[in-house]
Image: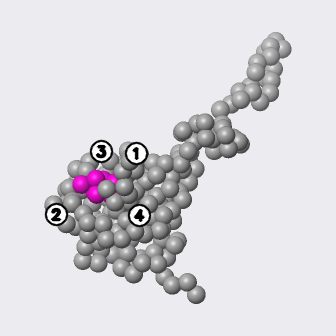
Amino acid sequence: MLLGIKKGAGGAVTPLRIRLAPYLIQRSQKDIMDHPSMRPKVGVAAIIVQDGKVLLGRRRGAHGEGDWCFPGGHLEYGETVEDCAKREAMEETGLGIKVTGRAPFTNDFFEKESKHYVTLFVVARIESGALTNREPQKCSGWQWFSWDALPSPLFLPIINLLKTGFNPAGGLPEKR
């Protein structure tokens, strides 16, 4: 983007250019639709519950590095949310899961990384397998936590999920 002109030594004129992050540039709806990198992506997260605790792993090598998150990943073309959660749980943890319910979705803007996700959450229980860290390049390890004692820092979708008042043991609080 050309911002102006800079005069150098001897009166030489040089165009002054800077590059703006995509989220700082105002774009029309058509521009956004024409650029797939600007479209929101769909993430799926499995809230695996066992003995009143949920499984969280510490992210590595991607946006939210160092944050605690549920097993999950991108929804693939033609895949159901439940099948995505099962696939991601097996790929990341070695656990076969049974989806027992759905949780609220979140709308997550990662401004620093210029990423936008809609995250779909499912609640699940372990059906088979043994917990292992099958993708150590993406997760530094898995641990169980009580819902009322979650670690910090949490991945943005979990922060936004907590804002809804959701609890995997009791669903959503009643509206008054």
Residue type at mark 1: give it: Tyr
Q: CA distance from mark 4 to mark 3?
A: 23 Å
The local secondary structure at tag 1 comes to loop
Q: Residue at x 21, y 59 (%)?
A: 95
What span is colored magenta in the figure?
84-90
* Mark closer to the chain start, 1 or 4: 1
For this orientation, the residue located farthest to the front is: 78
Q: Which mark is residue 77?
A: 1
Q: CA distance from mark 4 to mark 2?
A: 20 Å
User: Percent position (x, y) of residue 30?
Assistant: 67, 40
Residue to which mark 2 is pinned: 128
Q: Is residue 13 above or below residue 150?
A: above
Residue to which mark 4 is pinned: 121
The kind of secondary structure the magenta stretch mainly shows is helix
Asked whether the beta carbons under mark 1 and mark 2 sit within 8 Å of each other, the answer is no
Residue closer to the observer: 78 or 103: 78
Of tags 1 and 4, which is closer to the observer?
1
Residue type at mark 2: give it: Ser
Q: CA distance from mark 1 to mark 2?
A: 26 Å
* Mark closer to the chain start, 1 or 3: 1
* Mark closer to the chain start, 4 or 3: 4
Q: Residue at x 41, y 63 (%)?
A: 121
Q: CA distance from mark 2 to mark 3?
A: 24 Å
Q: Which mark is residue 137?
A: 3
Does the rendering let one see residue 144?
no
Residue type at mark 4: give it: Phe
Residue 112 on the magenta segment: no
